[in-house]
Amino acid sequence: MAKGETIGTVDTAFKLIGRDHDIIVEAYDDPAVQGVTCYVSRARTGGVKGSLGLAEDRSEASISCHQVGPIQFSAPIPKQEQVFSERISLVFKRLRVVRMVDMQRHTLIYLTYSDRLIDGSPQNSVTAVPIGTQTPIQLKD
């Protein structure tokens, strides 16, 4: 699973004690597709609980993936695969990014959403990276 690189943050609410509420923007390089980077923005809860990692962050997130270099596949990829995951609460809630392959349009689709052990959220965001027919996409069986 790829690790995120923090690009920046913007404060959204002042907290007297602990970190302010903020929005964080992180970059994730797709581990199986060289030349594709996804940028994910999400809200983070501040205050004492947020600073200690005990607060539950909101489920909303936005994603934008782009070709940042020549596209290369290190190996055949699955038609659908989780490529990034990050904890957004102490135990049960995760932010996930799933890559899907649209072979007909020669495009990679990236979907972000959050889930919990029992109940997930319908909040989601999607982005697409066209590959072009000159770069073959090989799928795993």
Image (cartoon, rainbow, N blue to C red):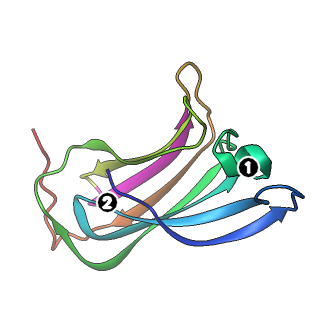
Residue extending farthest top: 118
Image spot of residue 101 (x, y percent): 29, 50
Image spot of residue 123 (x, y percent): 63, 40
- The dominant secondary structure in magenta is strand
- Residue at 63 percent across and 44 percent down: it is 53
Q: Quadrant of the C terminus?
A: top left
What residue type is disc 1 on? Answer: Thr
Q: Secondary structure at mark 1?
A: loop
Between 46 and 116, the residue placed more toward the observer is 46
Q: Are marks 2 and 1 in contact (CB under 8 Å)?
A: no
Q: On the rendered structure, is 36 left or right of 96?
A: left
Instruction: Read off the magenta span.
Output: 105-115
Quarter of image, res 107: bottom left
Residue annotated with mark 2: 107
First in residue order: circle 2 vs circle 1: 1
- Residue at 85 percent across and 55 percent down: it is 17
Q: Badge 2, how many Cα within 10 Å: few under 14, some, many 20+?
A: some
Q: On the rendered structure, is 75 left or right of 85?
A: left
What residue type is disc 2 on? Answer: Thr
Residue annotated with mark 1: 45
- Residue at 25 percent across and 71 percent down: it is 132
